[in-house]
Image: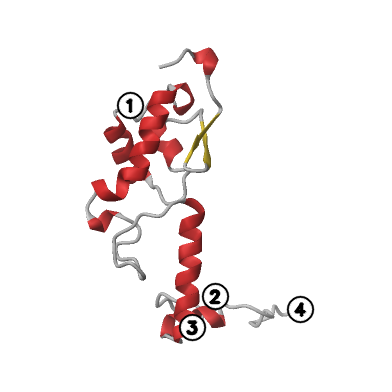
Amino acid sequence: MVEESELKYFVRIINTDLDGTQPVQLALTGIKGIGLHAALIIARRAGVDTRATMGLLGDEDVAAIEEQVKAYPASVPKWMVNRPVDVYSGEPKHLYGSDLSLAKEDDINLMKKMRCYRGIRHENGLKVRGQRTKATGRFGKIVGVSKRRN
């Protein structure tokens, strides 16, 4: 641990600036693709106290956390990664940051190209996951009952 006067307000891990004033577990959730449970696993495997302030960690602790973030997909079961079966390679992957956003966008474009049900729903801007659409998710002019004027 470093003295409190040496608090780093931003800690950079995996091309993401993390809030140095937060505890390690919460700060790691600032990386897109890492939730609370994954952050807990990463911090424990790095040997860092999950409640320690992120900005007070030494450089070796931050390096250990970054190493564990990169090794996360290999160290957890297949069902804990955010991409259990990659469409192109067939291997389990865990994507972070902009890679996750791009992969999601590519998946949606692939569905649109295949003209599958979900792809067509995405194209038309409709709900995709089976939600009801009779009353919610409307767009355009407001249509409904108008109040009676006295």
- Determine the CA span between mark 3 and mark 2: 24 Å
Of callouts 3 and 4, the N-terminal one = 3
- The residue at the point 64 percent across, 82 percent down is 145
Looking at the image, the residue that sits furthest to the left is 77
Residue 133 makes an appearance in the image: no
Q: Secondary structure at mark 2?
A: loop
- The residue at the point 46 percent across, 64 percent down is 103
Q: Where does label 2 land, which residue? A: 137
Of callouts 3 and 2, the N-terminal one = 3
Q: Where does label 1 land, which residue? A: 49
- Determine the CA span between mark 2 and mark 1: 44 Å
Marks 4 and 2 close (CB-CB < 8 Å): no
- Determine the CA span between mark 3 and mark 4: 51 Å
Q: Where does label 3 land, which residue? A: 113
| Front label number (2 vs 1) | 1
Amino acid carrying mark 1 in the image: Asp
Q: Where does label 4 land, which residue? A: 149
Amino acid carrying mark 2 in the image: Gly
Q: Split into 4 quadrants, where in the image is the C terminus? A: bottom right
| Front label number (4 vs 2) | 2
Of callouts 1 and 3, the N-terminal one = 1
